[in-house]
Image (cartoon, rainbow, N blue to C red):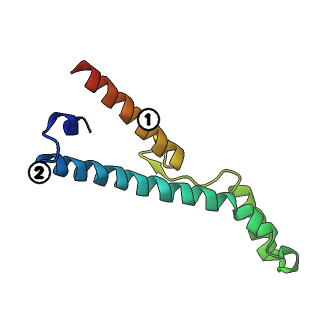
Amino acid sequence: MFQLTIVVPLSSEFYSFLFYANSIISQIFIYCWFGNEVQTKSDKISQAIFESGWTDFPLKTKKDLVFLLMRTREPIKVSAFNLFSLSLDTFMRILRTSWSYFALLHQVT
C-alpha cells in the first residue's frame, strides 16, 4: 500500500501495485475465512453428537462417541506455523497492524 502512495496515480505501475495488494489481501482472507469455518464447525460437533439420538446406538458406538466428546472439548483450529490460529479475528488484526505500519511509513516520508 505504501508503494501506491509513491507512484503516479492511475498509471500502469499504480494498477499493478493495486492488483498485487488486493491479491495478497484476498489470499490472506481466504485462509482466515476457512480457518474460522473449521473452528465454528468444530464447536458444533458436541452439540451434533448430543442431538443425534445416541441413546439408540449400540454400546460400542456410544463408547466411541464418549471418546470423541472427550477429545472435542477445544475447537479444532487451523494455525500458521503453530504461531497463531487463522480466523477472522486474526485477519482483522493483520489488517490493523498493516494499517499502522502504513501510517507510520507515510508519516515518516
Camera-nearest label, 2 or 1:
2
Q: Is residue 37 above or below residue 17?
A: below
Element under disc 2: helix
**At 64% from the left edge and 53% from the top edge, which residue is drawn?**
75
Q: Is residue 36 left or right of residue 81?
A: right
Q: Is residue 87 left or right of residue 50?
A: left
Q: Nearer the viewer, residue 98 or 103?
A: 103
Q: Nearer the viewer, residue 51 or 6?
A: 6
Q: Is residue 99 above or below residue 73?
A: above
Residue 100: x %, y % from top left = 38, 29
Q: Residue furthest top?
A: 108
Q: Quadrant of residue 51?
A: bottom right
Residue 87: x %, y % from top left = 52, 49
Residue 96: assigned label = 1
Element under disc 1: helix
Q: Is residue 94 left or right of residue 17?
A: right
Q: Nearer the viewer, residue 83 or 44?
A: 44
Residue 95: x %, y % from top left = 41, 40
Q: CA distance from mark 2 to mark 1?
A: 28 Å
Q: Residues within 10 Å of mark 1 (few under 14, many from 20)?
A: few
**Count of marks placed on residues:** 2
Q: Residues within 10 Å of mark 2 (few under 14, many from 20)?
A: few
Mark 1: amino acid = Arg
Q: Quadrant of residue 59?
A: bottom right
**At 19% from the left edge and 37% from the top edge, which residue is drawn?**
3
Residue 44: assigned label = none
Quadrant containing the N terminus in the rendered view: top left
Residue 32: x %, y % from top left = 46, 52
Circle 2 residue = 12
Q: Nearer the viewer, residue 58 or 42?
A: 42
Mark 2: amino acid = Ser
